[in-house]
Image (tube, grey):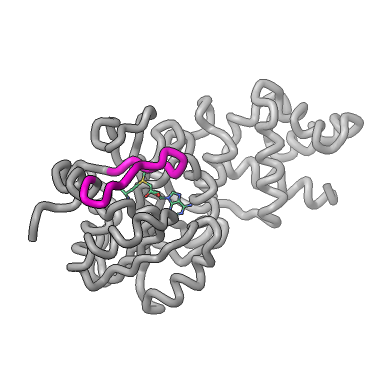
Amino acid sequence: AGPEVSSPKRTKDIIAKYGFQFKKSLGQNFLIDSNILGKIVDAAQLDKSKGALEIGPGIGALTERLAQTAGIVTAVEIDQRLIPILREVLAPYENIGIVHGDVLKLDLKALIAERYNATDRISVVANLPYYVTTPILMKLLEERLPLEHIVVMIQKEVAERMAAKPGGKEYGSLSIAVQYYCEPQIVCTVPHTVFIPQPNVDSAVIKLTLRDRPPVEVEDEAHFFRIVQASFAQRRKTLANNLSSLFGKEHREETAELLRACNVDPGRRGETLSLAEYACISNALLAKGW
Ligand code: SAM
């Protein structure tokens, strides 16, 4: 076997051979660092009994590592120009399936049912296109796909928001949405020198371990997330003010009462509340028919 796909020389050779032109609009920044790839794959805790689903394989740097470590590997790539390149570069690996498509439009439940054995534990492992990180992750979580881990390289600021605890400026509705479904852990931060072309933001690898069940009891998830969104609508406003914009100013005192019943001071800001406090508030509002 020749040098691995991620080696800078092999990457440059592949790009030159096919005359590939990077599309910035598709978030194409290819990884050329073996060490970082090792950290991503290690974090996913794969072995030959497990499946890997990759989003955006590019020219196959990470896909190759996944094929060596995991059982069945499926890679979904939106850019038609990369499909023949992937097929040729990854031809030595029999456990890889390449799917041409937009991950946001694909029926991932059906894809998983089709590609893997029913008993396989599957993880998403990817160096995500940064322009659609949040929609992709929310789709994976909201569709409740049967996943063990999600290990992804994303923009560092987004990783910090996902993993943030109450009280800081990074904590917001994204932290709550992610932590409702998973336990987040930042694996490492990554300098932009390990990509070609280099992105103009810093990156981090985040590992999300899917929970068997949410950490709090929520009667109605859509309602819970609506309350969370509203509580951060204007970050400098108090919780009582943000929520009474939602239910009408005339209900301000009633809203404050209800917050107190959940042991939450109405003067607090949304960014200081835990998931449990949001769950209590949402359930109490629902009980009132709000
Ligand atoms: N995995 C490769 C690596 O690490 O070198 C490439 C990562 S690059 C940051 C992101 C990849 O996602 C690109 O190959 C891009 O074409 C692809 N992509 C962008 N939007 C996508 C979408 N909606 N669905 C599937 N793939 C997408």
Region of the chain picked out in magenta, as a range? 16-30
Q: Is residue 26 magenta?
A: yes
Task: Choose between 200 and 45: the one closer to the eye.
Answer: 200
Task: Determine the residue positioned at 29% across, 68% down.
Answer: 96
- Let me know if residue 33 is in the magenta part: no
Residue 189 in view in this figure: no
Q: Is residue 46 left or right of residue 26?
A: left
Residue 277 lies left or right of residue 125; in this view the side is: right
Q: Is residue 3 left or right of residue 50?
A: left
Rendering coords of residue 75 (x, y %)? 36, 61
Q: Give the residue displayed 69% in from the left and 26% down from the top.
A: 234
Direction left: furthest residue: 1
Q: Quadrant of residue 105?
A: bottom right
Vertical arrangement, residue 84 with respect to residue 132, above or below: below
Q: Identify the image quadrant of the N terminus.
A: bottom left
On screen, residue 47 above or below 199 = below
Q: Residue 39 location, x and y as percent?
A: 23, 46
The image shows residue 269, relative to residue 146, as above or below, that is above
Q: Quadrant of residue 91?
A: bottom left
Q: In this orientation, which residue lies closer to the viewer: 273 or 63? A: 63
Counting every numbered tag in the picture gives 0
Residue at the image position 31 percent from the left and 32 percent from the top: 198
Name the spot of residue 95 as percent of width and height, x first.
26, 71
Report the residue at 36% width, 68% height from top. Answer: 121
Residue 159, horizontal then vertical, whole percent: 42, 38
Q: Is residue 281 or residue 181 the one in the foreground?
A: 181
